[in-house]
Image (spheres, rainbow, N blue to C red):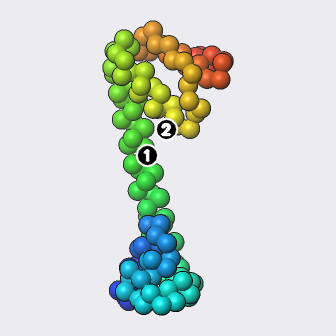
Amino acid sequence: MRLQNIRHEKFAQLIASGAIASKAYEEAGFSPNGAAQGAERLGSKPAVAERIEELRVDTERLMAMKRTDYLGELQHRFLTLPPSEPATVRYGEMLARAMGWNEPEKINITAASEIQIRIGGMDVPEPS
């Protein structure tokens, strides 16, 4: 829930977005004199700390949805492009990286439904 004090809310939003505490403190309208100490005091107030955490959770949720959309789009393009298309290999590599796999050393595509990915010198077996 938004903080009633506008400067506290601005500070919380800036901190949740990754700003440096002293810069966020100044940007929220507080004096630059003693900004580091003031930011530490303000950030430790229970209502402000709760708001920062709430904003971070909301941001993470949005990022997770965007990641899901991104993975879905990569998968769609990878599976719908012809295997002979150079972009198909590129989408396969991007998909592998986005899913947290090591960068593939070699990708052999013989058909859209038959894909072999070589990671670290070992072929990954196709699922049965």
What residue is shown at x 44% (from left), y 87% (from top)?
32
Q: Is label 2 in a helix, a strand or a loop?
A: helix
Frontmost residue, 104 versus 78: 104
Position of 62 relative to 85 (above/below): below
Residue 64 coordinates in the image, percent (x, y): 45, 51
**Foreground tag (1 vs 2):** 2
Q: Residue furthest front?
A: 33
- x 61%, y 23%: residue: 119
- Element marked by disc 1: helix
Q: Residues within 10 Å of mark 2 (few under 14, many from 20)?
A: some
| x 45%, y 32%: residue | 94
Q: Residue at x 37, y 86 (%)?
A: 29
> What is the spatial separation of the Cα atoms under label 1 and label 2, in whole angstroms?
9 Å
> Badge 1 is on which residue?
67
Residue 45 in sight in this render = no
Residue type beneath disc 1: Arg
Q: Which numbered disc flags the more N-terminal residue, 1 or 2? A: 1
Q: How dense is the environment of label 1, judged by Cα within 10 Å: few (below 14), some, or many (20 and up)?
A: some
Q: In this figure, which residue is indicated by the disc labeled 2?
A: 98
Asked whether, in this view, residue 121 is left or right of residue 45, the answer is right
Can residue 58 be spotted in the picture? Answer: yes
Give the quadrant of residue 127. top right
Quadrant the N terminus occupies: bottom left
Check whether the beta carbons of the residues at disc 1 and disc 2 lie within 8 A of each other.
Answer: yes
**Quick check: 85 left or right of 64?**
left
